[in-house]
Image: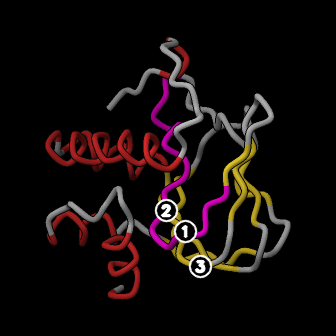
């Protein structure tokens, strides 16, 4: 488990969490090997997991033809599972072999619902991450993408 916690500490979104919160989050994670060309999430499908990159390179393909590459351990993918529709809004494909830490949707939602301070910290860091990492992505105010936590 300590390797997974080190990955969480490296990432923008989770680095500011208290050690106790990191351990709680770490207890929900499942390590998953990924293969080159593997699709982790498909736009429009039910969002079942969030992913934290441990190693490798992921491509995020967006609806408007824009793409982003995630290659930093600790990068976080899949926050749309909190949206009112609960569907992936992007397709995520592995460009190389690697490893992700996967957290089931229901487990993640249960965690943040029971701890509003933790939820607020994660959401604030998520917005900072998007602004810094994907500044070209327009933030839409839509009932379909409202976050509920």
Is residue 121 shown left or right of residue 106? left
Q: Foreground residue, 120 or 135?
A: 135
Q: Is 78 covered by the magenta stretch?
A: yes
Q: Is residue 102 above or below residue 117?
A: below
Q: Residues within 10 Å of mark 1 (few under 14, many from 20)?
A: many
Q: Is residue 128 above or below residue 7?
A: above
Q: Which mark is residue 75?
A: 2
Could you tell me which secondary element the residue under label 2 belongs to? loop
Disc 1: which residue: 53
Q: Which mark is residue 55?
A: 3
Could you tell me which secondary element the residue under label 3 belongs to? strand
Contact flag, marks 2 and 1 (Cβ < 8 Å) = yes
Please report the bounds of the magenta region as a residue range: 69-84
Residue 30: give x, y in percent of width and height: 50, 72
Could you tell me which secondary element the residue under label 1 belongs to? strand
Residue positioned 49% across, 62% down in the render: 75
Contact flag, marks 1 and 3 (Cβ < 8 Å) = yes
Disc with the residue nearer the chain's start (2 vs 3): 3
Residue positioned 20% across, 43% down in the render: 114
Q: Which mark is residue 144?
A: none
Residue 28: give x, y in percent of width and height: 38, 65
Q: Residues within 10 Å of mark 2 (few under 14, many from 20)?
A: many
Is residue 149 shown left or right of residue 144? left
């Amino acid at each position: 488990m300590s390797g997974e916690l080190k990955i969480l500490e490296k990432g923008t979104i989770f680095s500011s969490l208290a050690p106790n919160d990191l351990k709680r989050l770490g207890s929900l994670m499942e390590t998953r090997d990924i293969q080159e060309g593997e699709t982790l999430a498909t736009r429009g499908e039910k969002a079942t997991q969030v992913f934290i990159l441990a190693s490798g390179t992921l491509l995020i393909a967006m609806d408007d033809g824009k793409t982003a590459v995630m290659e930093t351990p600790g990068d976080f993918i899949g926050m749309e599972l909190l949206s009112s529709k609960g569907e992936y809004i992007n397709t995520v494909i592995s460009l190389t072999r690697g490893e992700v830490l996967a957290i089931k949707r229901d487990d993640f939602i249960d965690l943040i619902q029971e701890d509003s301070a933790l939820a607020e910290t994660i959401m604030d860091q998520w917005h900072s991450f998007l602004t810094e990492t994907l500044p070209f992505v327009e933030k839409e105010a839509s009932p379909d993408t409202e976050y509920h936590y």
